[in-house]
Amino acid sequence: MTRCDWATTERSIAYHDAEWGRAQHDDRALFESLTLEGAQAGLSWETILAKRAGYRTLFMGFDPALVARFDDSRIAEIATDARIVRHRGKIASTVGNARAFLAVQEAFGSFDAYLWAFVDGAPVVTRWRTRDELPDTTPLARRIGADLRARGFTFVGPTIVYAFLQATGVVDDHLATCFRSETHAEGA
């Protein structure tokens, strides 16, 4: 079975096959993905996947209403826990982003409605042939990142936002040769 060539370990293959690039509309899952993509900055995705269970535990199942109530002492406590990446700035960012996330939900009804409005509710489908063709970011990621920053989010630079869009299926970047690619499934 041919996959996107970054999926090479048991963990990354399972993530690729079951989650990556699938249209995500659940707000809690969107908050998780945004958090994990920010946590990944400067690290490998494999590291983050290995620590995902710890993130889910320490960040209350990624319930933004609960995370938004974390105070400095809770942030300091989490920063000592080896089950996650112990980067205080990324941890504090998650708490601040939870608060901004709630404000987006209030303004748009859901984070899902906010996010998918950028693409008129339909995924942007690409069919790159090789990983070398994949961009690090796009105008869409830059636009969404700028809007998120204006709304108080942090760790949402254009590369992080692009990875978030790929992960949540807003942008479907499965390679044309990947079994998850519609083009491949159609025999193109």
Image (cartoon, rainbow, N blue to C red):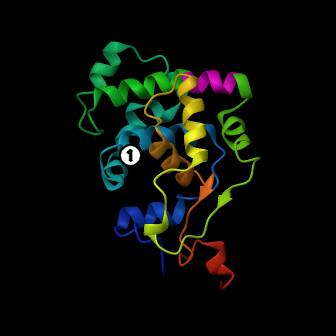
In the displayed structure image, the side of residue 73 where residue 68 appears, left or right: right
Q: Position of residue 150 (x, y in %)?
A: 57, 24
Q: Which residue is mark 1?
A: 52
Up the image or down, 178 lies above or below 123; here it is below
Rendered residue at 69%/81% (across/down): 186
* Farthest-out residue, front: 139
Q: Nearer the viewer, residue 35 or 5?
A: 5
Q: Position of residue 16 (x, y in %)?
A: 48, 63
In this rendering, the count of numbered labels is: 1
Verify whether residue 84 appears in magenta: no
In the displayed structure image, the side of residue 138 where residue 110 appears, left or right: right
Up the image or down, 16 lies above or below 27; here it is below
Kind of residue at badge 1 = Arg
Tell me if mark 1 has few (under 14), some (14-19) or many (20+) residues whose alpha carbon lies within 10 angstroms of its own. some
Verify whether residue 101 appears in magenta: yes
Examine the rendering and report whether any part of residue 77 can be seen.
yes
Q: Nearer the viewer, residue 141 or 174?
A: 141
**Residue range of the region highlighted in magenta in the rendering:** 100-106
Q: What kind of element bears circle 1? A: helix
Q: Nearer the viewer, residue 131 or 72?
A: 131
